[in-house]
Image (cartoon, rainbow, N blue to C red):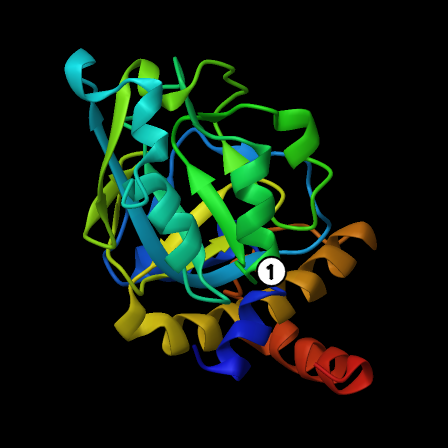
């Protein structure tokens, strides 16, 4: 992805991005129900590479399946491009794990930018210590074969009720994860950068005792326009 866009998205919040997308008519881009597995202190940003699970059928989901070199879960880990975020459609249930620490460690070593599932991870405490952003709903110990079958790689999926197309830009922060359609990533990032600057200015004003009315949103342009521009110049924003 565009390195400048990536740098911007590393420094804006999911909440700000959600507002920018809302302005464009997109209201369901936040992946619902997922949280960081140990916040790493910096945003997760990268193009989506997807893995889809379906309900397991017992005759197809024995432990011997993991010996198959073409098993989609293993192949997804080994083919997710460097700098991409692996996004898993786990049917919004964490009765069985989407993955565990060994596979996520391998993804990290291959340069993955992060991993998201609307299910759960096993070995979550170990994943929390890895140097790769990870998001899930809750810890889950049973193997994914219990009730999920990995069935398709890098096709459109739903994850936590959000549509995810391969190549869409995934951003995660300390709160949650959002999906930005690839074709509008640069303009959304640029707007979010401007919004973030103004929001930082607003926080300073509020802490100084300024009322919200007229300030946020900036209705009183006559008063706050010049103040904001002076603040930007002072802070290099």
Res. 156 in view: yes
Quarter of the picture holding the C terminus: bottom right
Q: Is residue 19 visible?
A: no
Out of 233 and 16, give the one closest to the viewer.
16
- From the top left corner, tell me how far across and down residue 61 is, in percent: 25, 20
Q: Which residue is mark 1?
A: 215
Q: Which structural element holds mark 1?
A: loop
Residue under the image location 75 percent in, 59 percent down: 205
In the rendered image, residue 18, in percent from the top left (x then y), is placed at 41, 53
- Seen at 49% across and 46% down, the residue is 115
In the foreground, 204 or 109: 109
Does 160 sit above or below residue 108?
Answer: above
Going 67% across and 83% down the picture, which residue do you hit? Answer: 229
Q: Specify the quadrant of the image occupied by residue 234.
A: bottom right
State the image coordinates of residue 172 (x, y, percent, origin top left).
53, 50
Residue 217 location in percent, x, y?
Answer: 51, 59
228 on left or right of 102: right
For label 1, the crowd category at 10 Å Cα-Cα, with few meaning under 14, some 14 to 19 and many 20 or more, is many
């Amino acid at each position: 992805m565009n390195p400048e866009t990536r740098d911007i998205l590393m420094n804006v919040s999911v909440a700000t991005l959600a507002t920018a997308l809302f302005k464009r008519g997109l209201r369901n881009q936040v992946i619902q129900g997922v949280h960081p597995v140990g916040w790493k202190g910096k945003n997760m940003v990268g193009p989506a590479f997807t893995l889809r699970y379906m309900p397991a059928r017992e005759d197809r989901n024995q432990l011997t399946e993991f010996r198959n070199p073409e098993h989609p879960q293993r192949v997804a880990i080994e083919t997710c491009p460097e700098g991409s975020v692996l996004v898993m459609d786990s049917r919004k249930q964490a009765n069985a794990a989407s993955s565990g620490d060994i596979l996520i460690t391998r993804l990290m070593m291959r340069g993955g930018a992060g991993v998201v599932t609307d299910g759960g991870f096993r070995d979550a405490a170990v994943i929390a210590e890895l140097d790769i952003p990870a998001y899930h709903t809750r810890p889950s110990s049973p193997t994914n074969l219990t009730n999920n079958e990995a069935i398709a790689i890098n096709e459109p999926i739903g994850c936590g009720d959000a549509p995810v197309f391969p190549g869409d830009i995934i951003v995660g922060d300390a709160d949650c994860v959002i999906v930005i359609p690839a074709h509008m990533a640069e303009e959304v990032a640029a707007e979010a950068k401007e919004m973030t600057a103004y929001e930082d200015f607003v926080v300073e004003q509020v802490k100084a005792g300024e009322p919200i009315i007229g300030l946020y949103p900036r209705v009183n342009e006559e008063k706050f326009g010049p103040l904001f521009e002076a603040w930007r110049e002072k802070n290099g924003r």
